[in-house]
Image: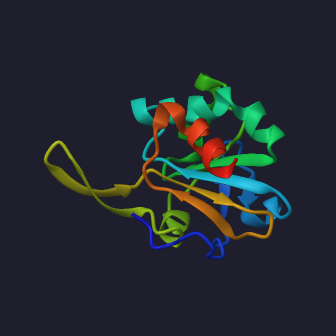
Amino acid sequence: MTGLKEGDKAPNFEGINQDGKTVSLDQFKGKKLVLYFYPKDDTPGCTAESCNLRDNYKALQDKGFEIIGVSIDDEQSHQKFVNKYDLPFDLVADVDKKIVNAYQVWGEKKFMGRVYDGIHRVTFVIDEQGVIEKVFTKVKTKEHTEQILEAMG
């Protein structure tokens, strides 16, 4: 799933968001960051997860968290996804797989008897100093905010 663990320094990253702007880990120094990796824009599980984070965005911000989503979809796909579901946070397009590889979330998956490579649904909570505070490998898409707030309580 991922070789990174709590207490590890979060790999720095830089990517382009849905608006064509550069987003990097450095921009979140001094803030807590929920960095969530998801397989594909506008699919049932990814939509449920993203909308759960959207619906609870204020509660997460009130606790000091910012949110960034990452998948290998391109900027245009992210723009449609953000617009369709009114997502208030950035989605980073990682088409060259640099970020998913740095966070070790790309790998073999199985679905309906088929084996293929893809993004594992993993969320990292990164503290103000850029250290991984929590790793979620069993994400409950419809209750992800609750998982985060409960664990970080």
89 sits to left or right of 1:
right
- Say whether residue 30 is left or right of residue 147: right
Determine the image quadrant of residue 80: top right
Which residue corresponds to the image point at 49% horizontal and 47% vertical from the top-left? 73
Colouring method of the image:
rainbow
Residue at image location 51% in from the left, 72% down from the top: 4
Q: Is residue 131 above or below residue 41?
A: below
65, 45: nearer the viewer: 65
- Name the foreground residue: 3 vs 133: 133
Residue at the image position 61 percent from the left and 76 percent from the top? 8
Relative to 9, residue 125 above or below:
above
Report x, y in % for residue 98: 53, 68
**Can residue 81 be seen here?**
no
Splitting the image into 4 quarters, where does residue 88 fall?
A: top right
Question: In the rendered view, does 23 fall on the left or right side of 144?
Answer: right
| Residue most extreme to the right | 30
Quarter of the picture holding the N terminus? bottom left
- Report the front residue among 97 and 130: 130
Residue beneath the point at 61% across and 38% down: 145
- Expressed as whole percent of the image width and height from the top left, the position of residue 113 reads 13, 47
Tally of numbered tags: 0
The quarter of the displayed image where residue 31 is located: bottom right
Q: Is 110 positioned to the left or the right of 139 in the image?
A: left
